[in-house]
Amino acid sequence: QRRGDAGNYKNSALSNLNPAPEAFRPPDMADTENPVIDSVYLQSQSDYHYTMGESYSLEGNSEKAIEEFKLTLIYDPNSVMVRLRLSVEYVRQGLLSEAIEQAELAVKMDPKSSEGRLLLGGLYSSLKMYEVALKQYETILEFEPKNEEARIYIGAILAEQKKFEESIKMFEELAKISDREKKFQAYYYIGRIRAEQGGKENQAAAEQAFSKALSLNPKDAESVLALAKLYEIQEQNKKLLRLLESFQERFGPHPRVAQQLSNIYLENDNYKAAVKQLEYMEGFEPDDLSVKFRLGLLYVEMKEYEPAIEKFEKLLELEPDSDRTRFYLGAVYEELKRFDQAVYNFQKIPASSSFFVDANIHSAYLLKLQSKFEESIAVMESAISQRDDVPQFYAFYASLLDDKKAYSKAVTMLTGAVKKFPTHTQLLFFLGSMHDRLGNYAETVSSMKKVIEIDSNHVQALNYLAYTYAERNVNLVEAEKLARKALEFQPKDGYILDTIGWVLFKQNRVAEAIPYLEAAYRVKSTESIIAEHLGDAYYRYELVDKARKMYLKAVDIETDSSKIKQIQEKIVAIDQQMEESKTRTPASSPSSKKPKK
């Protein structure tokens, strides 16, 4: 085929613009010999497309509804109702200009369409075009003087414009001409306006108006909630609670009343009552996950762990990726000592979550409690590989390596961590204590001094450095200053009391040392080293019986076999000394074997 030849086929199947089978062609609109418009056909097409538009609208498919209503107008262009329906669908699509255009056409075609003017006034109001909106409502009152909706909208616009007295006058007129249904609404709006004006006088008028509205319609939740808000502003908590409880008991449950009541009950720690209201809310909004979560938290607060688990598990069915729910579910299992399930849930939480840090610390801790040290270490190593910017991970990892006596590995790891976080005092402290385990005195002192340089009130470092000096019998004056400063912050800490006592002992100020060591033992009677220190002080002060008793207690507490042997040697030395003293003659003065300090 050559160019320009397409016209040769205009009547052939190749150029058919409607290629549907002949049986599916729409019926001819007119008789070609006697052209007249078939009104029955037009009406049937109009009805069909209008019905389709209504159907699509009910399904929430505004786009299709608009298409059908526009087709309806082809067959019935003068239908006011269709233009109003089209306007409503444009509103649903957010196409306000198109909505206004159709509403204006409807009003132009039927100037006395109150429905059209109400819709058009509402559209103008949404764009804050209050004067033209008022014109629509006032026009309605010209031909329908008792139109209640027009008066309500006029009053609302006047209130929005802060013309409160004019607005109230409009609602008072509405109350006079309306039946019971609209009359209560008039008083409700008067109450809203007076409440917005504020001040004691207006608040009193608002309370009176809301009460009048409720006397006309005691089932109106909006009036109850508005009055409740007023009582809340006035801090009339008893009246507030009585109002809401009375309404809920007589006409409830109502979801918004339940929400406000639940908040009040929670503020007063009345968890049982709050749960009841939240259960009402859950019944109204079964898909509201926030209500289910709040219920789960309340069950936890009430120590009703099984219902909490049930609620959190249900939440995870609906929202499997909720790390918040997963964390709290793990926490409940932890509380019930169902550690495996707790760890399982904690380990499901991704590194991107704000709960990731706590979840992994908890996991490692629970595994440690079960003496699953290798698994606990693996959790920390995995956590660090995913988030190497969390200093708490390195600190907890160090404590695990300490438990495993893997001191060299801990030093290597912490040295790297301190490079990442050079001012993190806890990591520096852990590094110093690991060096101490390895006998690296200089590195221990250096790390502790760095901690104190960063935080001069770091109690642990002050005490640790003081004790380290005392053990080495060096810098004892400085050691005493450090320990006493630590004691200022924690005057009842057994370890700090022991350090001061030990520093004084090392300075041969035994009489001063004993009260501190006795105080330390009273606080920490389960610490073998404190009992031993007190025994040494008693022995130095020649309170041999007391020293022996304290050494025996130290042996009972101590778990390290080499330490037990050292303390037992002190007991044996005392026993030998006591035996020798029984057989020694008054003139003789042989040197007795003394316990090693």
Image (cartoon, helix red, strand yellow):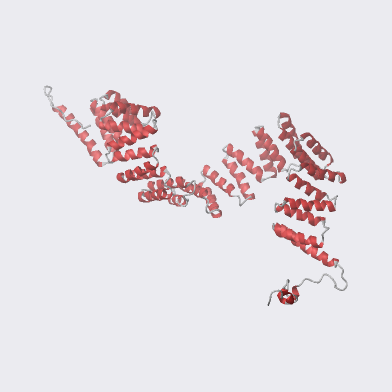
Point out residue 28 in the picture as x, y percentages from the top left corner: 81, 71
Q: Quick one: which residue is furthest to the front in this view?
A: 3
User: Does 563 appear above or below 484?
Assistant: below
Residue 190 relative to residue 533: left or right = right
Residue 464 relative to residue 164: left or right = left
Residue drawn at x 71%, y 35% is 196
- Quarter assignment of residue 472: top left
User: Does 64 appear above or below 488?
Assistant: below
Residue 281 in sight: yes
Q: Give the quadrant of the N terminus.
A: bottom right
Q: Between residue 470 and residue 25, name the one nearer to us.
A: 25
Q: Between residue 195 and residue 465, name the one nearer to us.
A: 465
Residue drawn at x 13%, y 22% is 586
Residue 154 relative to residue 586: left or right = right
Point out residue 242 in the picture as x, y percentages from the top left corner: 67, 37
Q: Between residue 328 and residue 84, name the one nearer to us.
A: 84
Q: Between residue 104 and residue 289, name the one nearer to us.
A: 104
Q: Give the quadrant of the C terminus.
A: top left
- Quarter assignment of residue 509: top left
Q: Exactly how many numbered labels are in the figure? A: 0
Q: Quick one: which residue is furthest to the top in this view?
A: 587
Point out residue 45 in the picture as x, y percentages from the top left corner: 79, 65
Point out residue 291 in the picture as x, y percentages from the top left corner: 59, 47
Residue 524 in sight: no
